[in-house]
């Protein structure tokens, strides 16, 4: 199996070139073709000599994802379902904001964290995505934009699709280096957000990376009892372990953390939980922002979305206590918007098709 060339950072490609007897400047040429001209075949690299093209063809591929489904919403959201080389399927979403175009990428096939409200968690992790497969999601979306002919660029990235990015740490870091590199896509670090369910040791490591990427923590509950009930990762990393990791990150980076808080009707959306959350964050409120996310219904899941009034009360309670917060606006409500839903539907369809085939044979 050949590697995806998108998976290599600029330094890795330069080392590879010299190890294979090629001049260092070849990596700059290759990156120009890949990320500026966005070619999809090595033979299109006009200023690269044939022996280098042959070498690249021998060791690497460019495109490994095939587009299975593309759903476009009235609000401009586009949801892609890609098939990987091994037949697994993943989702990627393009969202339009007034500040730019943001892509939500997937980092794993399924997720082992198993949060009770998440469509991704229902399907266990099958494997990690390679750094190349994560970069290629951005490239495929950029190619979709190129085809529209409006000269639009992906300007923001949120690592909030299926999977726990800190459970695929090395590939995540390589991905971030590739998309952030000025010689490539040059997407600003401050325009990239990584969301984690709270793998505390990796939060220390991330703080030490010295990159200016934004961090979001899926907190979802202000105490251990409730957090463990909805997120079993809290058994391994309860708040006593998580809060010091957050403090370390804030001290080391002086960057704001976004706390994501999904609002589930009658589960974690009472005023007392808002008060408790404000208490938990009070000593770091100058560097905190709470993103309230109304629960997005998932098939066969008993949870319900909070009432509008409960959402407003929660929001106001935090604001009154000096905690900056906002309610996430929804995108693509007329398509399979909730994370992991398009993929789950597709897997169910595939299972039904296989069963039917078996019965017929
Ligand atoms: C899918 S996760 C991926 C990143 C990482 N694993 C995490 O949990 O932060 C991204 C965000 O989507 C949220 N999410 C998951 N299922 C959801 C649902 N049904 N409705 C609304 N948000 C959901 C998660 O809580 C998390 O904050
Ligand atoms: S919310 Fe994040 S960590 Fe939890 S199951 Fe979904 S993808 Fe995994």
Image: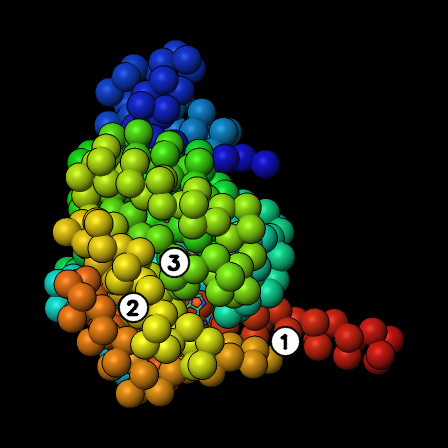
Disc with the residue nearer the chain's start (1 vs 3): 3
Secondary structure of the residue carrying numbered label 3: loop
Query: Is residue 188 among what the camera can see?
Result: yes
Choose between 100 and 184: the one closer to the eye: 100
Choose between 333 and 305: the one closer to the eye: 305
Would residue 222 appear left or right of 74 to someone viewing this image? Answer: right
Residue identified by numbered label 3: 219
Residue 327 x %, y %: 25, 73
For the residues marked 3 and 2, what is the alpha-carbon distance in whole angstroms?
14 Å
Disc with the residue nearer the chain's start (3 vs 2): 3
Name the residue: 58% across, 53% down. Answer: 112
Q: For residue 274, what is the image quadrant?
A: bottom left
Q: For residue 28, what is the image quadrant?
A: top left
Q: How crowded is mark 3: few (under 14 residues within 10 Å), some or many (20 or more)?
A: many
Would you say the residues marked 1 and 3 are in contact, meaning their CB atoms lie under 8 Å apart?
no
In this rendering, the label closer to the viewer, 2 or 1: 2
In this rendering, the label closer to the viewer, 1 or 3: 3
Is 49 rendered above or below residue 94?
above
Choose between 8 and 115: the one closer to the eye: 115
Residue identified by numbered label 2: 275
Residue identified by numbered label 1: 349
Residue 148 x %, y %: 23, 67
Is 87 rendered above or below residue 345?
above
For the residues marked 2 and 1, what is the alpha-carbon distance in whole angstroms?
44 Å
- Please state, as top left, top right, bottom left or bottom right, where the N terminus lies in the image: top right
Is 233 rendered above or below residue 181?
below
Would residue 107 appear left or right of 211 to someone viewing this image? Answer: right
For the residues marked 1 and 3, what is the alpha-carbon distance in whole angstroms?
33 Å
Q: For residue 211, what is the image quadrant?
A: top left
């Amino acid at each position: 199996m050949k590697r995806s060339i998108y998976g290599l950072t600029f330094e890795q490609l330069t080392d590879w070139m010299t190890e294979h007897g090629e001049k260092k400047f070849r990596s700059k040429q290759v990156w120009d073709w890949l990320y500026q001209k966005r070619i999809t075949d090595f033979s299109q690299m006009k200023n690269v000599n044939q022996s280098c093209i042959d070498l690249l063809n021998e060791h690497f591929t460019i495109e490994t994802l095939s587009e299975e489904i593309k759903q476009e919403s009235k609000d401009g959201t586009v949801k892609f379902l890609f098939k990987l080389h091994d037949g697994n399927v993943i989702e990627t979403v393009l969202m339009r904001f007034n500040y730019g175009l943001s892509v939500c990428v997937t980092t794993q096939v399924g997720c082992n964290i198993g949060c009770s409200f998440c469509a991704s968690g229902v399907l266990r992790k099958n494997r990690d995505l390679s750094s190349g497969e994560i970069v290629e999601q951005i490239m495929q979306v950029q190619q979709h934009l190129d085809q529209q002919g409006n000269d639009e660029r992906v300007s923001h990235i949120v690592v909030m699709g299926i999977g726990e990015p800190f459970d695929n740490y090395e590939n995540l870091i390589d991905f971030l280096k590739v998309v952030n590199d000025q010689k490539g896509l040059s997407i600003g670090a401050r325009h990239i957000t990584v969301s984690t369910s709270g793998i505390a040791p990796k939060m220390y490591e991330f703080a030490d990376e010295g990159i200016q990427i934004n961090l979001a923590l899926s907190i979802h509950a202000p105490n251990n009892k409730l957090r463990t009930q909805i997120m079993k990762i809290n058994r391994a990393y309860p708040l006593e372990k998580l809060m010091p990791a957050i403090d370390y990150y804030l001290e080391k980076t002086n960057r704001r953390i976004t706390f994501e808080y999904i609002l589930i009707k009658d589960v974690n959306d009472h005023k007392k939980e808002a008060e408790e959350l404000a208490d938990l964050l009070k000593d770091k409120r100058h560097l905190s922002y709470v993103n309230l996310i109304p629960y997005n219904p998932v098939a066969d899941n008993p949870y319900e979305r909070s009432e509008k009034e409960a959402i407003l009360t929660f929001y106001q309670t935090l604001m009154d206590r000096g905690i900056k917060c906002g309610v996430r606006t929804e995108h693509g409500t007329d398509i399979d918007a909730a994370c992991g839903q398009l993929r789950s539907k597709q897997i169910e369809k595939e299972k039904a098709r296989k069963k039917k085939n078996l019965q017929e044979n």
